[in-house]
Image: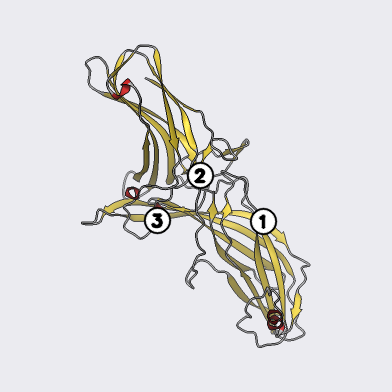
Amino acid sequence: MDFTIQLKSEGNGLHRGVFSSGDFLEGDIIIGASEEVMVDSVDISFVGRARTRTDNPSLPFPSTTEKEFLRLQQPIEGSVKTAMLFQERHSYKFPFTFVIPDRLLPTSCSCHNNTLEDHLVVPPTTGGHQRWDHDGILLDDPTPDMAEVVYEIAVKVLHSKHQGRGIAEHSSRRVCVVPEFPETPPHFIEKTSEYRLREEKTLSRGLLKGKSGCLVMETQQLGAISSGLYGPATVVSLPVILRFDPASNDDAPPALENVRTKVQATTMFWSGPVVSSGKEQVSYVSQRSYSETVPLTSLRVAGARWQKHSQEWAHEQLAAGERVDAIAPSATYKGGCYYLLKLSIPIQLPANKALVPTFNSCLVSRSYRLDLTLVSSSASSLVLRAPLQICR
């Protein structure tokens, strides 16, 4: 039998062939018979599944784990509900209509942890050799080959040739899905976390000349930013405040050079299910991760003007009802004048990368970290690491 899966819809996003929550997935499946066959059933489904692979040196083959988290079935109208004779060299058309859901059924997750709500959010297409083609530009996907989340329209025909035994034939066509994701609250950052929103560094006047002061760099967590895979990409400004606490009134702030930004994309994947006794819950014994760093921008800040303030300045501004862009002093601050500098760092995801939305599912998850590096002429670099959520 020959199968042709035709799509009539292209999604409602900026890019063709990318579907999101609430989009209609419409088309036809054309089945051609090369000889006369008795068809017992035709099954048309929209399927979502995750698959992971881990290599074990002690085994001759890799370990693969697969989970189907979504299956929507198309009702078949007419006589195919019962046996139907397909004529030789005839084609038969079956229309289908699916709607991309924004949530999964609670039965789709049986993980032995407290992340059920995260696991019921529809994950985006990830890996699986998906071709992200935007206006003729093929995007680079940082997902490793060991993890994938795929969606497909699948057709399965059960038939028999005359009085022969039943034969199942099937075909499928993959579909790219980038669901809408709710913005999550800011992370609670512990001292042991990989994230760091503030850093201090003691500066030296030179060899055997003592300390010139302490440089402080601080930022905050951004709200969710758009991936640009479904809708237009967004540009946001990340505020960064620098403070210099001089060791004496004669010490000036350091000369700054640039601020470099980059995003680290981390794919976590699990394999090897273990059923917990008596609770029908599943845990995964093998956990792996793969990270790839994506450079963003390098903003030149040489010549930026520091503002000198007295110790009482912030209190005076607050008493007058004025906005104060200030940060806490360094651990070595002993009073007196200090310097402040506020920077606004533009953050935009690169147009040549397929950075899917942040998600956490049963087998595969994706998280991001935004790194900022301040380079100055008189000190080693200061580095901040902030959590970053990417949405649709």
Query: At 40% across and 56% down in the image, what residue appears?
Result: 117
Check disc 2 and report the residue beneath it: 178
Looking at the picture, tell me which residue is in the foreground, 228 or 323. 323
Q: Nearer the viewer, mark 1 or mark 2?
A: 2
Query: At 56% across and 64% down in the image, what residue appears?
Result: 386
Of label 3 and label 1, which has the lower sequence position?
3
Numbered mark located on residue 117 in the image: 3
Q: Quadrant of residue 215?
A: bottom right
Looking at the image, residue 94 lies above or below residue 46:
above
> Could you tell me which secondary element the residue under label 3 belongs to?
helix
Q: Quadrant of residue 376?
A: bottom right
| Residue lying farthest to the top in this orientation | 88
Query: At 69% across and 73% down in the image, what residue appears?
Result: 323
Q: Give neighbour class at mark 1: few <14, some 14-19, many 20+ (Cα, 10 Å).
A: some
Amino acid carrying mark 2 in the image: Val
Looking at the picture, tell me which residue is in the foreground, 164 or 91. 91
Amino acid carrying mark 1 in the image: Thr
Residue 372 is situated, as x and y percent measured from the top left of the image, at: 62, 63
Q: Give neighbour class at mark 3: few <14, some 14-19, many 20+ (Cα, 10 Å).
A: few
Q: Nearer the viewer, mark 2 or mark 3?
A: 3
Quadrant for the N terminus, please.
top left
Residue 192 is situated, as x and y percent measured from the top left of the image, at: 47, 71
Check disc 1 and report the residue beneath it: 297
Along the horizontal axis of the image, is 276 left or right of 303? left
Residue 234 is situated, as x and y percent measured from the top left of the image, at: 63, 51
Q: Quadrant of residue 64?
A: top left
Amino acid carrying mark 3 in the image: Glu
